Image (cartoon, helix red, strand yellow):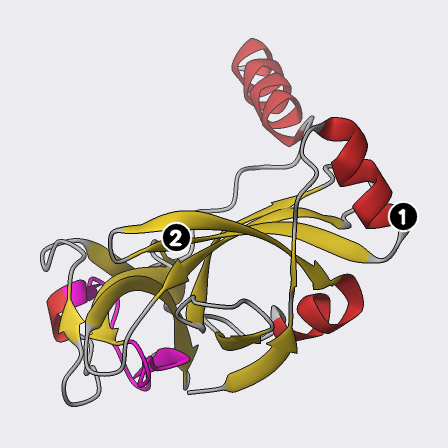
Amino acid sequence: MSEVRIAAEPRTEFGKGAARRARRAGKVPAVLYGHGTEPRHITLPGHDLMLALKTPNVLLRVDGVEGAENLVLPKSVQRDPIKGFLEHVDLLVVKKGEKVNVEIAVTLTGEVAPGGIVTQDLVSVEVAAEATHIPEGVEFSVEGLEVGTSVTAAELKLPAGVELVTDPEAIVLSVSAPAAEEPAEGEGEEAAEGEAAEASAE
């Protein structure tokens, strides 16, 4: 589990104008909440935060916020839909030893049996894990799986101490045969015309 230390500053200005000024200064508005505490409004260094968020479910140790728990998980990240820069982040306060619900990626490895095609229905699953021991993801080997095979979430092998929250019966992947190729445009018409010509000749 990755843990990144990041410096924060209390935020006293609010509204769209204040948020724009913070982003122009290279900072991202954020809110700390959880454990029954009052929400804390802060700003975080944009570049450092962007690098940290490249790691799924990164654990942040926030410095500079007096009187607040400083171990947090990013729970909601808002980005500009066009330019992609960070607009706002919600941070959930966590404590060592407690479990939190998070999404982790499902990565497939290996090759299915010849003639099979894998369709991955779930690219991530929700799990409950200790806040300081969140797995980066889970791997599943499709090596040798035959056509007609389907795999449910319950069949994923999660690390010790990690519990599945996603419906155990949810289909993660299935192996199917390739779809029959349809005749190229015009081929069917030509065949029909040929048959009609033969019938007329008879």
Between 196 and 141, the residue placed more toward the observer is 141
Q: Which mark is residue 58?
A: none
Q: Residue furthest top?
A: 200
Tell me the magenta residue range: 131-153
Looking at the image, residue 171 sits to the left or right of residue 113; the answer is left
Q: Quadrant of residue 108?
A: bottom left
Few, some or many C-alpha atoms within 10 Å of disc 1 (few <14, some 14-19, many ≥20)? few
Is residue 18 found inside the magenta-colored segment of the image? Answer: no
Determine the secondary structure under disc 1.
helix
Residue type at mark 1 is: Arg
Q: Is residue 8 visible to us here?
A: yes
Mark 2 is surrounded, within 10 Å at the Cα level, by few (under 14), some (14 to 19) or many (20 or more) other residues, namely some
> Relative to residue 192, is residue 21 drawn left or right?
right
* Residue occupied by mark 2: 33
What secondary structure is marked by label 2?
strand
Q: Residue furthest right?
A: 24
**Extreme-front residue of the structure:** 67
Earlier residue among tags 2 and 1? 1
Which picture quadrant has residue 164? bottom left
Residue 52 x %, y %:
63, 74
Left or right: residue 144 versus residue 48 is left
**Which residue lies at the image location 13% right of the left edge and 73% below the top edge?**
163
| Of residues 144 and 92, the one drawn nearer to the viewer in this rendering | 92
Residue indicated by mark 1: 24
**Image position, residue 139 (x, y; %):** 35, 82
